[in-house]
Amino acid sequence: MQFSDADVDRLLAVAWWDWPLQRITEHIRTIMSGSVDDLENAATGIR
């Protein structure tokens, strides 16, 4: 899967790989789906 430069910037801002393990486990399907919008929604409250 290839992402646009804008999506790469958004993914770097979300930084799901730095989330607590429990949060990653809860959102693994979202992480694997590749949807940047869904990842941003899941990241709410983490930053």
Image: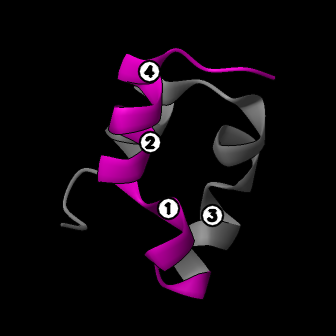
Q: Does residue 22 lie above or below 32 as drawn?
A: below
2 and 1 marks in contact (CB < 8 Å) = yes
The residue under the point 65% across, 40% down is: 30
Q: Nearer the viewer, mark 2 or mark 1?
A: 2
Mark 4 lies on residue: 5
Number of other residues with Cα within 10 Å of mark 1, as a class: few under 14, some 14 to 19, many 20 or more: many
Q: Point out the residue furthest to the top here.
A: 4
Q: Which residue sits at x=48%, y=84%?
A: 20
Residue at point 72% right, 55% down?
28
Q: Nearer the viewer, mark 3 or mark 2?
A: 2
Region rendered in magenta: 1-21
Q: Secondary structure at mark 1?
A: helix
* Residue assigned mark 2: 11
Under circle 2, the secondary element is helix
Q: Is 13 located above or below residue 39 in the figure?
A: below
What x and y, as percent, mark residue 35? 59, 24
CA separation in Å, label 1 and label 4: 18 Å
Cβ atoms at labels 3 and 4 below 8 Å apart: no
In which quadrant is the C terminus drawn? bottom left
Residue at (35, 36) in percent of width and height: 9
Of labels 3 and 4, earlier in sequence is 4
Residue under label 1 = 16
Disc number placed over residue 26 in the picture, else none:
3
Q: Mark 3 belongs to which amino acid?
A: Glu
| Side of 24 where 45 appears, left or right | left
Amino acid type at circle 2 is Leu
Within 10 angstroms of label 2, few (less than 14), some, or many (20 or more) residues? some
User: 24 left or right of 11?
Assistant: right
